[in-house]
């Protein structure tokens, strides 16, 4: 089970370690907290984009309420992930709370694009989720520890998250074997940015893309 889960999620593991190190470096260089707080965020928050966002907000002196609202808006996309996983998580028992907590963008991609061993679906889901979080926490710790002890220029490190999402989009493209969902996502994003601006575009773009996918559903299933 563990070897099967690790084989399917290995690209995410390596990306999570690298991305987590990027977060840890930013955390250590921009904030005055001890390095192990970055590890704590990886354990109890486990939200890559939200953690990068939190570093910027904390560094700018944002209040707890502002951070909470910004994080809630950023992570609203997980609402749609959760809806699509309702049937898959049904009957997960004791695994279910953790599976819900650990449902990141990349874990969602692995769970929806790989096959679980026969009769061990929820154990497989759990193994993938735990492996991914352990990789993320390891990266956060390594990056923060190094950043707290070495003089490192972190300019451009935040782009590592964009690179990770690009890889995930390509992996999803290989699974569906059609470029139309990616074109839909790009059009939805550009339209939202044009109407509302980049700072307010994320949730409207997700809503537009979801509606578009529902309209394209029959064609995609074929």
Image: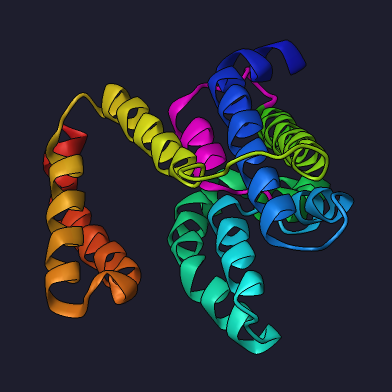
Image: 64 above or below 41: below
**Vertical relation: 217 (above or below) 17:** below
- Give percent across and percent down for residue 84: 45, 53
**Corner quadrant of residue 122:** top right
Residue 85, image x, y percentages: 51, 50
Residue at figure coordinates x 56%, y 71% from the top left: 71
> Would you say 108 lies left or right of 213 here?
right
The image shows residue 75, relative to residue 113, as above or below, that is: below
Residue 202: image quadrant is bottom left
The quadrant of the picture occupied by the N terminus is top right
Observer-nearest of 69 and 206: 69
The verdict on residue 101 being magenta is no
Which is nearer the eye, 198 or 203?
198
Q: Is residue 112 magenta?
A: yes
Image side of residue 153 versus residue 165, left or right = right
Q: How is the image coloured?
A: rainbow
Which percent across, then down, holds residue 30?
67, 59
Residue at the spot 40% in from the left edge and 33% down from the top edge? 168
Look at the image and give the residue range highlighted in magenta: 102-120
């Amino acid at each position: 089970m563990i070897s099967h889960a690790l084989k399917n999620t290995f690209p995410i593991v390596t990306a999570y370690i690298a991305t987590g190190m990027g977060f840890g470096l930013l955390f250590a260089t921009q904030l005055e907290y001890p390095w192990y707080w970055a590890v704590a965020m990886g354990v109890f928050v486990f939200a890559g984009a939200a953690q990068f966002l939190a570093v910027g907000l904390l560094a700018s002196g944002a209040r707890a309420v502002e951070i909470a609202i910004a994080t809630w808006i950023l992570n609203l996309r997980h609402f749609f992930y959760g809806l699509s996983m309702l049937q898959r998580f049904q009957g997960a028992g004791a695994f279910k709370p953790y599976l819900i907590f650990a449902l990141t963008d990349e874990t969602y991609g692995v769970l929806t694009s790989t096959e679980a061993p026969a009769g061990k679906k929820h154990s497989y889901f759990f193994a993938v989720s735990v492996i991914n979080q352990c990789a993320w926490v390891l990266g956060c710790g390594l990056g923060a520890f190094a950043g707290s002890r070495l003089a490192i220029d972190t300019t451009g490190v935040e782009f590592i998250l964009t690179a990770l999402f690009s890889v995930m989009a390509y992996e999803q493209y290989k699974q569906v074997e059609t470029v139309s969902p990616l074109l839909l996502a790009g059009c939805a994003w550009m339209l939202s940015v044009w109407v509302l601006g980049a700072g307010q575009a994320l949730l409207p773009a997700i809503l537009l893309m979801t509606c578009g996918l529902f309209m394209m559903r029959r064609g995609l299933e074929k």
